Amino acid sequence: MSSETAVGDFGLIGLAVMGQNLILNAADHGFTVVAFNRTVSKVDRFLENEAKGKSIVGAHSIKEFCSKLKKPRRMMMLVMAGKPVDDFIELLLNEGGIEEGDIIIDGGNSHYPDTNRRTQYLAAKGIRFVGTGVSGGEEGARYGPSIMPGGNAEAWPYIKDVLQGISAKSDGEACCQWVGDEGAGHYVKMVHNGIEYGDMQLICEAYDIMKRGLGLSNKEMGDIFSQWNKGVLDSFLIEITRDILYFNDEDGSPLLEKIMDSAGQKGTGKWTAINALDLGMPVTLIGESVFSRCLSSLKQERGRASKLLSGPTPNFTGDKQKFIDDLEQALYASKIISYAQGFMLMQNAAKEYKWKLNKPEIALMWRGGCIIRSVFLKDITTAYRNNPELENLLFDDFFNKAIHNAQEGWRNVVAKGALWGLPTPCFSTALSFYDGYRAENLPANLLQAQRDYFGAHTFKIKPEFANEKYPEGKDIHVNWTGRGGNVSASTYNA
Ligand code: NBP
């Protein structure tokens, strides 16, 4: 095909909900987009309908797709994560005729180790690979998602105009910045999704307490979420929860109460929790939010357990409005903990994987376009802009004060949940983390003693008790019973 046909500024493979909307978004921003899809009939359907009259051209083969793109080619895939991404890479290499310097962007929810592998594989062939998180669902893709690109940094100057052009803006700043090397973009998107799991579960716990603990109607709960959306909790997820609570079915009753209480998941929350375990980071809130979905999915078994296992019945007395204010504080404080944990994880991953992550920019990228967008992320951006080396979000003055002020209400809610027999896994784990994190002394001394008692796993002595018998910094084993030997196990941490 002649070079006159190379009209495309940007190519997109994958015409499902995300791909189609991102193409329309890019066309609105003045880019000529070339569209392709595995099932080619979808290309024509798209061109005849949504894409009609726009600067969008179709391709019916991968060769045609590549030939219609200006060089260096800028191509994005929005296909199901996993094998389809590898298959398309091979097609582009073997049949598309892509060349050195061309750029392939994977915008799907790929697992970051796959992105590490693909970046290296393609770099060896002179192809620049970028793995980017895209968040915001259908509407975000159409009008401005949060975009988190990472991978081969050489690609960034060539794709910055397109990605920042189509991304959401927050206070005039693009919610799209270069995240870091290899799988860093997909890693940050994974943590974003984990945090999204946590935010959603926290809201569900507040709903449960209002419904079963306070006996509020859906309209009353909708009014409360509407109120909360004007304060510190102002966010997309609080806003849609308000709308869901107000939504009535045709028979006039709330649709929400007809929906099966068994949650699904597509894996990104689980990946975050597994990675936190691998890195030894106490990201407890995301972990609990994943387990909460698992527990909910045991619907049949829970039905049987509800008839066999006893517990208290919620019985609220006192000032309802005061308790609702406490609940708002519990949600706010737990959310602060969740984000603090998420940033602890990313900070550690950056160290472990030797990425240079830009924390203020990450918070900025999440401020608009994505599912966890909120006013609160502006405060996180400010905290990290004030001090990019901030050891922990909780050490920032603003958040330190915020969590201090929220404590009384937070503790009251967790205590009432326990007394009423209502589960609050994320409120509770957030509070336990907070109390553990701020404790200079934890009972891990006993744990170490137990480990040494039964397995000769050794312990270290507190510096103030060090002496000749118990030297400071050394691995010590004691013969606790007089029966064991003096040989200790080798010391390593898994
Ligand atoms: P889907 O995740 O439903 O994927 C559909 C696309 O993948 C279609 O183009 C389909 O082609 C293609 N595909 C499949 Br399925 N199997 C294939 C295979 N074996 N080989 C080649 N192509 C294959 O689409 P989506 O919901 O638009 O999401 C796209 C990506 O963006 C995913 O990775 C998703 O996780 C991520 N994401 C989605 C959202 C969201 O809100 N939906 C948000 C953020 C990120 P076909 O038409 O021929 O079947």
Image (spheres, grey):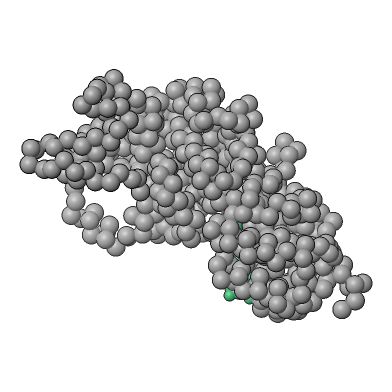
Picture coordinates of residue 349 (x, y %)?
A: 51, 45
For the residue pair 86 and 133, the one nearer the viewer reads as 86
Q: Residue at x 19, y 51 (%)?
A: 309
Q: Where 368 falls versus 307 (above or below)?
A: above
For the residue pair 489 and 80, the one nearer the viewer reads as 489
Q: Residue at x 53, y 58 (%)?
A: 113
Q: Residue at x 45, y 22 (%)?
A: 405
Q: Quadrant of ligand 1?
A: bottom right
Picture coordinates of residue 335 (x, y %)?
A: 48, 37
Could one spot residue 56 in this view of the protein?
Answer: no
For the residue pair 318 and 128, the one nearer the viewer reads as 128
Q: Where 94 falls versus 367 (above or below)?
A: below
Q: Quadrant of the N terminus?
A: bottom right
Picture coordinates of residue 209 (x, y %)?
A: 37, 40
276 left or right, relative to 102 = left
Picture coordinates of residue 390 (x, y %)?
A: 55, 29
291 left or right, relative to 58 = left
Find residue 208 and report its image quarter: top left
92 left or right, relative to 470 = right
80 left or right, relative to 263 = right
